């Protein structure tokens, strides 16, 4: 009985890991003109979001990838057809921590004691180092 429960939980977890979550909103910005009322912009924005959400929900049910890009494209096309200006998202770069490796002026590999290939006295060699 326990093995059936464990197997059913494992199957549910594996299927849940394969599910793709549709996006909840656009990553592009629609800008209204001066002669557009706020209520009209909100209505148009909501209509375009519903349209894009419906398409990406169907795509997510089919297991497609790249849903955010699809959502953004549908939303941007819908808003631009209604006369709004679309601004692309700003690229944010992360450079990470600095590099703390060896300095720029190194003289070669670490000291070698014993037999084998080595670098020393200006040339490569094989055998005892000294």
Image (cartoon, helix red, strand yellow):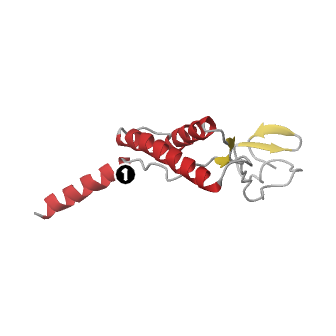
Q: Who is closer to the viewer here, 45 or 86?
A: 45
Q: Is residue 1 left or right of residue 69?
A: left
Q: Based on the displayed image, in which of its 4 quarters is residue 13 positioned?
A: bottom left
Q: Residue at x 72, y 56 (%)?
A: 96
Mark 1 crowdedness (10 Å alpha carbons): few <14, some 14-19, many ≥20: few
Residue at 85% x, 54% y is 103
Residue 18 is left or right of residue 119, and the answer is left
Q: Which residue appears at 89% of the width and 41% of the height?
A: 122
Residue 39 x, y percent position in the rendering: 59, 55
- The residue singled out by tag 1 in the image is 17
Residue 78, horizontal then vertical, whole percent = 56, 38
Q: Where is the N terminus found, in terms of image quarters?
A: bottom left
Which residue lies at the image location 74% right of the left edge and 59% below the top edge?
97
Q: Quadrant of residue 84?
A: top right
65 or 52, nearer to the observer: 52
Residue extending farthest bottom: 2
Q: Nearer the viewer, residue 15 or 44?
A: 44
Horizontal side, residue 25 vs residue 16: left or right: right
Q: Nearer the viewer, residue 4 or 24?
A: 24
Residue 37 pos. (x, y %): 65, 53
Identify the secondary structure beneath mark 1. Answer: helix
Count the numbered circles shown: 1
Q: Give the x, y percent position of residue 79.
A: 60, 41
Q: Residue furthest left?
A: 1
Compared to 8, does 58 lie above or below?
Answer: above
């Amino acid at each position: 009985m326990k093995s059936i429960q464990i197997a059913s939980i494992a199957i549910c977890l594996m299927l849940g890991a394969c599910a793709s979550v549709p996006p909840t909103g656009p990553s592009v910005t629609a800008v209204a003109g001066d002669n557009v009322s706020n209520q009209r912009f909100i209505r148009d924005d909501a209509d375009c979001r519903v349209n894009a959400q419906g398409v990406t929900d169907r795509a997510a049910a089919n297991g497609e990838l790249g849903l955010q890009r699809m959502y953004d494209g549908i939303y941007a096309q819908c808003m631009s057809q209604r006369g709004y200006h679309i601004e692309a998202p700003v690229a944010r770069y992360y450079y990470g921590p600095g590099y703390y490796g060896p300095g720029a002026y190194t003289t070669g590999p670490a000291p070698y004691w014993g037999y084998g290939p080595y670098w020393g006295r200006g040339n490569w060699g094989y055998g005892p180092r000294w």
